Each structure stands twice: as C-alpha cells, then as structure tokens.
Image: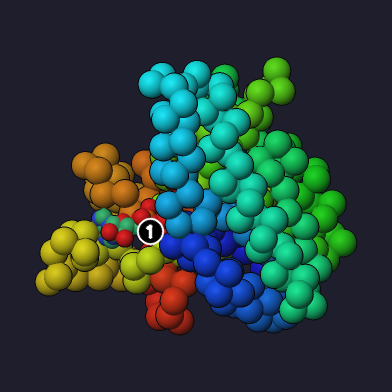
Amino acid sequence: MSLIVQKYGGSSVSSVEKIEHIAKRISKIKNEGNDLVIVVSAMGDTTDKLLELAFKLNPDPPKRERDMLLSSGETISSSLLSIALHSIGEEAIAFNGAQGGIITSEVYTKARIQKIEIKNILKELKRGMIVVVAGFQGITLHNNITTLGRGGSDTTAVALAAALKADLCEIYTDVEGIYTADPRIVPEARKLKHISYEDTLELASLGAKVIHLRAIELAKKYKITLHIRSSFTEKEGTIIA
Ligand code: ADP
Ligand code: ASP
Ligand code: MG
C-alpha cells in the first residue's frame, strides 16, 4: 500500500465530464489499496474569469480580497470532485487550504507555504477517506486566506507530498509530460522520459509553465520524485528526479 499525492490541473477538471473521468481514475487507484490525497486546480479558466470580474469593479483590486476571490475557484473544484467520488461509491472529503493545514506567509497573491499541519489529513486518511485538497491557497497565522501565485497548485501538491512523506507525487496535466520545448508551439518537440531538478528549474524559470518553479524547488529540497503525465491517457509521462 502506498500513499500517493496526485494533482489535477485546470484542464483535467474543466467540465463535469472530466471530473467524472478523473473520479473513476482515482477510484481505481484507491481500490488497488492505496491512500490518496488529491490536489485540484480551479476548473478551466475560472481563475482568469474571476480576475476579470475583479478588475471590472476596480482597476486595482486589494490583494487580500483578490486572494479571497481566487481561492474560491479551487474550493469549487475540490468539492465537485469529492461529490463525484461519492456518486461512484467512494468515501471522500474536500478541504480548502486552511482545512488542509496549509499555513503561509502573509504575502498576498504570492504567499509561501511555511508549514503544513497534517493532522486533519492524516485523521481522514486513517478513516479510509480520499482527501481532496484545494490547491493554490493557504491561510496565515492571522486567519487570512492567501494564494501561492499563478500555477501554485503544483506547489501545494509537492509540499503535501513532502509533509506526508508520500511514496509518489503525480502531476496530471494536459500534455503527456515535459518536452524539449512547449509542444503546443513546437510540434516536433520530444517528450523526455527523465529530467533532473536542475534542468526543470531552468525550464520553469525561463517561463515554461508546465510546472510551478516553487514546486520544483521544494521537490529538489525534499527529494520528492515527480511524475508529470496526462490525465487523458494511461501513458507514462516524465519523471523529475
Ligand atoms: P495545468 O493546468 O495542468 O497546471 P498548465 O497550463 O499550467 O497546466 O501547464 C501545461 C502547459 O505547459 C502545456 O499545455 C504546455 O502548453 C505548456 N508547456 C510549456 N513548456 C512546456 C514543456 N517544455 N513541456 C510541456 N509543456 C510545456
Ligand atoms: N488556478 C490557479 C491558476 O490558474 C492555480 C493553478 O492552476 O495551479 O493560476
Ligand atoms: Mg499549471
């Protein structure tokens, strides 16, 4: 039996059908005898849409309020995924970042995770629950909701994998792994089987948004092996180690 952290990006949860699809995938892995902590991003382009609304109301939306707003995107997808899991007979519980014990600095819109209080998650895993955590967010010691910067759900997943000493951390996205260049722009780009933390850091710092820079920094620091893969196929993706 393994403890697996899986993160599903916005494109993997962008519709009811896609949420149903990943719920089935999660159920299969759970029934193979694994403990699962699932991290989700907001559905599709929800984060952009919410930001657009804020900027319509105010050319400079206060950052604290922006974080309150944006965190709701991930809260929606975590609840919907948990609801979908229940409908196929699984026991699941959705947590927002605060309930998941994710404590951050007070730097709104780009907070850093300072510690994770894992007791709630551990309690639920012990009861056999699939724990679904809203990515991209946390809470400060002064009870304010923060977000971790665009693309930050990857970092939630890696930080949870480190705190829970998970056996595996899988990042599900809309491409089959890490390529030599962005496969949407360079069709002849080649998928990599393996890549080092250093090379991934370089890719991320050059702006390849396939994985959040901070997620790689944490993975390197805590020696977490990451598997970047597609939620739409069973194919092996890219191992970052
Ligand atoms: P998610 O919503 O799953 O977090 P993102 O949109 O943040 O997904 O990241 C995946 C995207 O990263 C891909 O659709 C691809 O266009 C882009 N990308 C940029 N550079 C690369 C690369 N070298 N390899 C793979 N994908 C890349
Ligand atoms: N939903 C957030 C964003 O669009 C976080 C994430 O997707 O990782 O940036
Ligand atoms: Mg992303």
Residue lying at 40% horizontally and 77% vertically, measured from the top left: 236
Residue 23, horizontal then vertical, whole percent: 63, 73
- The quadrant of the rendering that contains the N terminus is bottom right
Mark 1 Cα-neighbour bin, 10 Å: few <14, some 14–19, many ≥20: many
**In this picture, is 52 found above or below 240?**
above
Which residue appears at 48% of the width and 49% of the height?
46
SS type, badge 1: strand
Identify the image quadrant of residue 86. bottom right
Q: Position of residue 116 (x, y in %)?
A: 67, 37
Tell me what residue is drawn at x 33 percent, y 54 percent. 210
What residue do we see at 41% from left, 37% from top? 52
For label 1, the residue is 240
- Between 8 and 202, the one lying in front of the other is 8
In the displayed image of the protein, which residue is found farthest to the right? 127
Type of amino acid under label 1: Ile
How many labels were placed on the picture? Answer: 1
Residue 136 at x, y = what percent? Answer: 53, 42
Q: In this view of the protein, can residue 181 be seen by the observer?
A: yes
Q: Nearer the viewer, residue 126 or 90?
A: 90
Residue 122 at what x, y percent from top left? Answer: 79, 51
Residue 35 at least partly seen:
no
> Relative to 139, is 119 on the left or the right?
right
* 216 is higher (above) or lower (below) than 179: above
Above or below residue 52? Residue 88 is below
Residue 27, quarter of the rendered image: bottom right
